[in-house]
Image (cartoon, grey):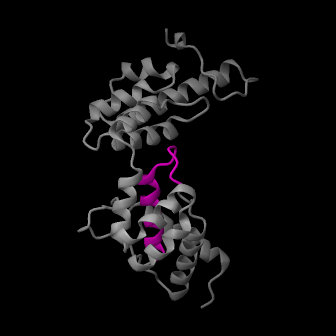
Amino acid sequence: MVTTRLQHHQLFAKEVQRLSLIDMEPSDTSPSSHSTVYRPLFTSNMEAQFMSTLAKEQVKTLTKFSGSESEDITHWLKHIEEVFDRALIQSSNKYLAIQSYLTDAALKWFRFNKQNMPDWSSFKIAIVQAYQPSIHQALLKMEQRTQLPGESVMEYYYDKLNLCVQADANMSSSMIIHYLTKGLHASLVAHVIRRHPATTNEFLNIAQDEEKFLLTWKGLSSPSTNEPDCYPSEDIYM
């Protein structure tokens, strides 16, 4: 049976949907950890070949890590390993391949310390220890993260949430909501507080509701304005 281009796209869409429903556990950098590799079930050899080719293309476009302060080593390493796992790359080959995704100071660090981390597991532990920010730095970065002009609530929410977890993996929901609210655009803060979100998911839903209302109001009151970062005054609720 010949598979058409349309069928390829349909198979890909189904697989992406299946992947999105799977909770990928973050990689544990402890020596005793075992990486969870998701190996999807394919209905045909052609489908398996298609997904394998897709994964290999993703490997080619992975972002390199330079070791600069603006980079997030935990997020980068987690993404690298997830893509490697989808491409069914074994640990020994991950270790060989990772050198191609290090640059500048991080590459120099790797070459100097290579003898002390002979495999993938030891590499993960070492690079996190070398480039993970201090608790003080993580807290400062998290507190300074605010919703940028023109940035959607959802974009801000997931970035800030990730920073909260980095700063304190055991941070309570109430504290996370406090920091999320504190960093919101000024036009949204009072309205989110008024609705008393009890969980982070409730915070996201409420903040998005308020965002949609404000943007709708803006569109009705000033249809000729095209700047997405200009929010209406809070007195529209009065």
| 111, 100: nearer the viewer | 111
Residue at the location (60% across, 76% down)? 8
The relative height of residue 220 versus residue 209 in the rendered view (above or below) is: above
Q: Main secondary structure of the magenta part?
A: helix
On whether residue 179 falls in the magenta region, the answer is no
Whether residue 206 appears in this view of the structure is: yes
Give the quarter of the image for residue 54.
bottom right
On whether residue 75 falls in the magenta region, the answer is yes
Residue extending farthest front? 112
Residue 26, image x and y in percent? 34, 58
**In this picture, which residue range is highlighted in magenta?**
66-88
Residue extending farthest right? 224
Residue 50, image x and y in percent? 57, 79
| 145, 229: nearer the viewer | 145
The quadrant of the rendering that contains the N terminus is: bottom right
Whether residue 205 appears in this view of the structure is: no
The relative height of residue 119 versus residue 153 in the rendered view (above or below) is: below
Taking the image as shown, residue 101 lies to the left or right of residue 20, namely: right
